């Protein structure tokens, strides 16, 4: 009799990261489509927008810099906000085999 092998037990750990309002809305849309096998992470300076996101994991960056009000589409403010929370971002991405940023 042929031996039936169990299904593959380990797959690549994939994280899709939505950065800012646009990236966050993109991953919320992916979540609505019930995309499987992916972990979603939202990263934003805008506390209100981040609160409404459907991602399993969220990182509010630049709390001290922007007071939760967003970066105003200024890439320098966004960069400084990410630097402020570098360790938290690294922690949320730990263990991923692939990371897609949108």
Image (cartoon, rainbow, N blue to C red):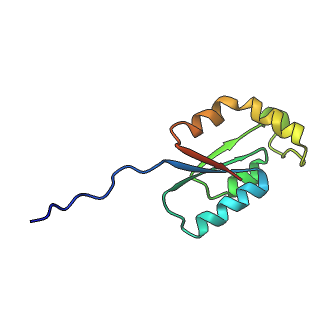
The x and y percentages for residue 42 are 67, 50
| In this rendering, position of residue 56 left or right of residue 81 | left
Q: Is residue 4 above or below residue 48?
A: below
Looking at the rendered image, the quarter that the N terminus falls into is: bottom left
**Which one is nearer the viewer's eye here, 64 or 6?**
6
Q: Name the residue at 62% across, 64% down.
A: 30
**Which one is nearer the viewer's eye here, 53 or 100?**
100
Q: Is residue 78 above or below residue 100?
A: above
Quick one: which residue is furthest to the bottom in this view?
A: 33
Quick one: which residue is furthest to the left in this view?
A: 1
The x and y percentages for residue 14 are 53, 50
| In this rendering, position of residue 22 left or right of residue 94 | right
Quick one: which residue is furthest to the front in this view?
A: 2
Q: Name the residue at 72% across, 61% down.
A: 25
Query: How many discs mark residues in the rendered view?
Result: 0
| In this rendering, position of residue 15 left or right of residue 21 | left
**Which one is nearer the viewer's eye here, 25 or 67?**
25
| In this rendering, position of residue 39 left or right of residue 4 | right
Residue 21 sits in quarter: bottom right
Q: Name the residue at 65% across, 36% down.
A: 89
The x and y percentages for residue 12 are 47, 49
């Amino acid at each position: 009799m042929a031996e039936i092998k169990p299904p593959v037990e380990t797959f690549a750990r994939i994280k899709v990261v939505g950065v800012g309002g646009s990236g966050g809305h993109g991953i919320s849309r992916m979540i609505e489509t019930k995309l499987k096998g992916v972990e979603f992470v939202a990263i934003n300076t805008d506390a209100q927008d981040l609160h409404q996101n459907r991602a399993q994991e969220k990182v509010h960056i630049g709390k001290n810099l922007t007071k939760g009000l967003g970066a105003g589409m200024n890439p320098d403010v966004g960069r400084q906000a990410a630097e402020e929370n570098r360790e938290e971002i690294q922690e949320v991405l730990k263990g991923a085999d692939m990371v897609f940023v949108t």
